[in-house]
Amino acid sequence: MCMIQTGEYRCLEIFMKSAEGKTGKLRIRKHNGTWTEYPAGIKQFRLSRIPVERAAQYEVELMQCQVSVAYLSESERMMETGICFLNYSNGDWIKVDNLQAWYDSPNREQYHFNAFKNWINDPNGLCYFKGYYHMYYQANPHRQEWGHMYWGHTASRDLVHWVHLPYVLEPQQEILEAEDKKGGAFSGSAVALDDEIVFYLTRHLGPMEDTEEETVQYQTMVTSKDGIHFGAETEIIRKPDNTFSFNFRDPKVFLFEGVWQMVLGAKVKGVPSLVRYTSEDMRNWTYQGILLAEYTEGVYTFECPDFFHVDGVFVAVGAWMMYVDEQRRYQPTHYYIGNYKDGVFQVESRGLYDFGGNFYAVQSFFHDGRQIAVGWTADCYLEHVPEENGSYGAMAIPRELSVRNNKLYRKPIREIYSLLGKGICDVAGQNMSVRHLNRNGYYVRIDFADATEFSLLLGESQEGKLWLVREKTRLQIKTEGVKSKYVSFETAVEQVRKIEIFVDRRLTEVFVNDGEEAGTKLFYQDDGDGVFCAAFQWENAVERIRIYEMKGIWR
């Protein structure tokens, strides 16, 4: 038995699962009061939401069950301070009131959003509502691996500093009561109206190994008045007919010329496709046909689609599931630029969204004159290093999107520069070696006056190294001694005028020429200090090099 002090919170939320062959439960009472019992899940973890009084002390007893994640929620200041996580260790509950210390590991990002612990993937439901940016995300709260999908939730006033908020969506009941099914709340988008947010998402239900006969994906909608408490979920769309595979998912919804539009990732007659629906009332949807078909051999299906208007053109985005390109990159995301009229999208140019190999499931939204995108840093090459209370996955720096010269530009949002800390160096172009960069969180900007080849060392461990290399018109993120060493993460850039590099422990992001190209790469180091070494073919071609420490976002 142990004690919990509730402080300013009015709810205890806890995921519990019974010990094998047992019927577990939690007992709780206000100090010396009457016990109340809450059952643990039998086959899977069950989320119990337990009302408590503020500023009270409770006795809590776990009986024949285990806990994955627990936290206190429902406070008056929750949008500003977030929930309060509880870590159950050695028979006692400890409030995690210092997230900076909790996240302080060589393999935990300090200024990118990542889970309190365990698995996260696709960003979902991005929107701005009543003074806050909201980001929902796919999550398995229980392990550092994919599992039945929940929606986690985080919010921010500036797209940089995030607070953790309660989980909002759970897997279907038939999944939680079975051992031979998988699925849950898959990806989707949000529309922020004046008085509520409307969410659209995919529900997945099927056997552990998907089959066309048994696996079902269907679209649902749900609303919220505050982004935290959700109403009843309603099914709205199933696949139109048997020419569609069960791969039918990830709705992106937006308003265009007074009509609500929905784009879904699908596979129609064996061809990966983005398909389109329309609605007058946001609830009743009519199938309008294929928006875009991708005939490249080897693409299993489209997923995580996006579709938006920027700089006078339309941009469609789709993740190429299970595809391996000529450089051996796995599951790249592609964009398509063109005109959209009368339901027809005419592609005029196309390109790779990120050349680094660890960027996936990108979603964007519009706010205050900007199209802002967030992607998931997917571990496509099985390089994750598990650790106790660690996290699998993080979100990349939000990117502002624009189109120039028929190319999609993806530059880091301006707010990220508020995290620049102490200057480490500011020098004219020269070869250099800076080691023992404090806690391996830093920013580099290099301005070029002329063309030169170069090699930049950005990460180093006993097993391998991470480089950014320029050879002629080729720019390449190169790894040595790690599982992704066989992959060529490269892109062609005619002229490199400016490079920005954000290193955040295991995660590195590279931006070229204010977003003309962007590359994301995971690299696990042995300790907490960073390295930056630069060798240039022509030093006088380098105008200036600046390096800064980056401040963390966890309070």
Image (cartoon, rainbow, N blue to C red):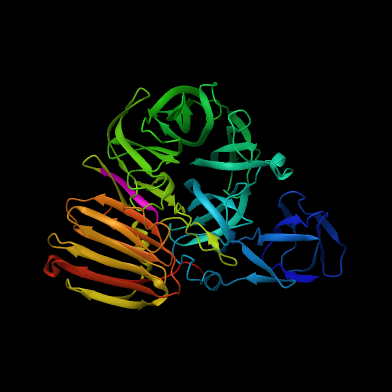
Residue 393 is situated, as x and y percent measured from the top left of the image, at 50, 56
Q: Is residue 399 part of the magenta span, yes or no?
A: yes
Left or right of 529, for residue 194: right
Query: In this picture, is 190 found above or below 93?
Result: above
Query: In this picture, is 158 found above or below 234?
Result: below
Q: Quadrant of residue 87?
A: bottom right
Q: Quadrant of residue 332?
A: top left
Asked if one can make out residue 209 in the rendered structure from this viewpoint, the answer is: yes
Left or right of 123, for residue 401: left
Left or right of 153, for residue 418: left
Q: Is residue 456 part of the magenta span, yes or no?
A: no
**Number of disc labels:** 0
Q: Residue at (57%, 27%) from the top-left corner? A: 238
- Residue situated in front as seen by the camera: 384 or 72: 384
- First to last magenta residue range: 397-403
Residue 284 is situated, as x and y percent measured from the top left of the image, at 55, 25
Asked if one can make out residue 516 in the rendered structure from this viewpoint, the answer is: no
Q: Quadrant of residue 377?
A: bottom left
- Residue situated in front as seen by the camera: 436 or 316: 436
- Residue situated in front as seen by the camera: 489 or 13: 489
Residue 188 is situated, as x and y percent measured from the top left of the image, at 52, 40
Q: Residue at (76%, 71%) from the top-left corner? A: 3
Residue 29 is situated, as x and y percent measured from the top left of the image, at 82, 64
> In terms of secondary structure, what is the magenta stretch mainly?
strand
